Image (cartoon, rainbow, N blue to C red):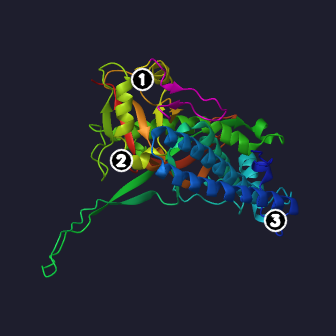
Amino acid sequence: MKKYPIQRGLQAVFAQAEPQDDGVAQILAKINELKTSKDSEISALKEQIAKAADTETVNALNTKLSEAEATINSLTEQIAALQLNGGGSGSLNAADKAAHDAIVAFMQRGEERAELKKSDNGNGGYLVPTEWDRTITDKLQEFSPARQVFHVQATSKPTFEKLYNLHGATSGWVGETDERPNTDNPTFKTLKFETGEIYANPSATQQILDDAEIDLGQFLATEVQGEFTLQENKAFFTGDGTNGKPTGLLTYAEGGTNATKHPLGAIKVVKSGDANKITYDGLIDLVYSLPATFAQNARFLMNRNTIAVVRKLKDADGNPIWQPSLQAGQPSTLLGYPVVEIAEMPDVAANALAIAFGDFKRGYMILDRKGVSILRDPFTKKPFVQFYTTKRVGGGVSNPEAMRLLKIAA
């Protein structure tokens, strides 16, 4: 579908115009109309999937459902961006302009103005304006596959608690005049997710900062995204939870360091069927070990080396089980499910957890604490000005039942 051009960036932070520009209002109306149509299509597809009798039909409907959901996400992003930018009215909101001017003056000359807002995380920095925060987040979404497959939860607090119902209520059969004794009550447990601090420390010469042509917001986002992405991706899969790190998905596996941490138990492990390699039967066991409740939006996660191994596998009739994508922007499939390349997943080796499978939006949660803060340091590394940039991030398994892991073992 066609995407309407949307201006973004630090140099163009706009407020919502009232009344809204007629041209933009028409664009928003058309996008909302298409979004409503896609919502109806998604509902109809889910009803068809629930009634489908064979796997081939379910897989075909799931593909259509994924395409419709991707369209909805794109439309939602366009609506939000158009509303934020006020339709390109070109007039800066007074408060946004003041914040923009204040942060640029702070980065260039270290000036501290009243418009600068102090960070509340105790490190003494100043909060980046909203548009900068959104720009950095967009970079992470684009470059970090983990953020595309996991659920991202924004929070303004250092911790986030989730309640789990372990059921346990009992019942019984009674006659018309029999006594009704008390039954057991359901059991509830809570799990706390904590955020830690991730940082980057880019620097630039004063001469570059004085250059009126440089986009300071883009400069900061580009410099920090590489470090943030590297550290986050490692932690989301293998993080040990120390020093503020997230607890990685793989550590929740049966026998792992966090196997007993979650109220719902560990992530179940399925053996590959061979002590040193992946087998076709092992992949079938992996797929069907996942409860049907989570199969609809399931996908595979594996690294590039593992993908090379899996692409060579064939079924009993000699047909490749890997199906390459025939449409731009759509993932290749394995046994009918999308495959996402994740560099942090282990290689195929004895006892390695080489493949993850499941509904990861429901299985793993990334916590983003609101606000990115910076400290300007023109003294430590002359002639460079350093910008100590921090963001608080956390992560952990929200539902181990939604995922399965393939272990290379007989």
- Span highlighted in magenta in the image: 318-336
Callout 1 secondary element: loop
The quarter holding residue 176 reads bottom left
Foreground: 225 or 172?
Answer: 172
Side of 75 where 245 appears, left or right = left
Q: How far apart are the alpha carbons under marks 1 and 3?
A: 53 Å
Name the kind of residue labelled 1 in the image.
Asp
The quadrant the C terminus occupies is top left
Q: Which residue is mark 3?
A: 17
At horizontal 67% and vertical 47% (from top left) the residue drawn is 135
Query: Which dot, 2 or 1, sits closer to the camera?
Result: 2
Query: Which dot, 2 or 3, sits closer to the camera?
Result: 2
Q: Which residue is mark 1?
A: 347
Name the kind of residue labelled 2 in the image.
Glu
The quarter holding residue 81 reads bottom right
Q: Which residue is mark 2?
A: 401
Name the kind of residue labelled 3 in the image.
Ala
